[in-house]
Amino acid sequence: MSSYTPVLKKLYAEQVVPALVKSRGYKNKHEVPKLVKINLNTGIDAEADKNQIADIARDMAIIAGQKPVLAKTRKAISNFKLKPNQIVGCHVTLRGDAMWEFLYRLLAVALPTIRDFRGVSPKLDGQGNYNLGITDFAIFPEITVENVKKSMGLDLTIVTTAGTDDEGRELLKLLGMPFRRTEPSAAPKTNAA
């Protein structure tokens, strides 16, 4: 058993917790919001063949570091051309050290490689959790673009114990989430003649 601690987890314990206690005035360190899990999710085209499904599952496993679960339909929906037990997506839930390692790779390596990147939206879901949509999963360096036959998007949900969006936003900002700066709305122009 190694005593390796992920970089971001160490940063959380040594810098983020004291900073949040100081800024928010928590009485106990257990009140400080923390990360619970990160969910990765992607959809699979209803007409995808077995090879395409296997490629998507392989790429998702490479990105997450663990095998994904394939999501199947429960019943047939003719309007969407779906049959019962047809694979329509795959998802992974990361917890513990795997979660911290993935978040570090996302913040330090993957997001900065997006062309014309100006930050991510500072909007949370109202309960302290953050959702992020990535249009092309090839931003992760683990993926070799030559093996990708079809581009795939990725939905990320970062679940925290924060009670409010402000607490969750501050936690993620201290961890290094590159939030977009919101420009103050310009004063309305008046037609002075």
Image: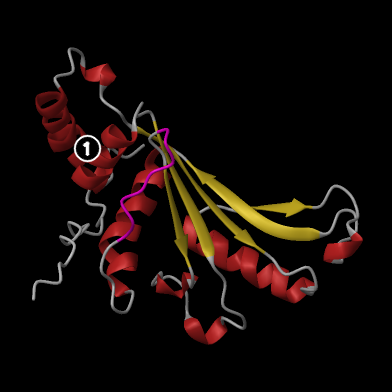
Is 16 placed above or below 101 here? Answer: above
Is residue 19 something that shows in the picture? Answer: yes
Residue 108 pos. (x, y %)? 26, 61
Q: Which residue is mark 1?
A: 12
In reply to whether residue 25 is colored magenta, the answer given is no
In reply to whether residue 122 is colored magenta, the answer given is yes
Q: Image check: 57 left or right of 131?
A: right
Q: Residue at x 61, y 52 (%)?
A: 91
- The region drawn magenta spans 120-127
Q: Image check: 55 left or right of 12?
A: right
Q: Residue at x 25, y 24 (%)?
A: 32
Splitting the image into 4 quarters, where does residue 27 fall?
A: top left
Q: Quadrant of the N terminus?
A: top left
Splitting the image into 4 quarters, where does residue 167 fall?
A: top left
Q: Image check: 129 left or right of 40?
A: left
Magenta: main secondary structure = loop
- Amino acid type at image mark 1: Tyr
Farthest residue, direction front: 193
Nearer the observer, 74 or 65: 74
Residue 172 pos. (x, y %)? 27, 44
Q: Residue at x 18, y 30 (%)?
A: 17
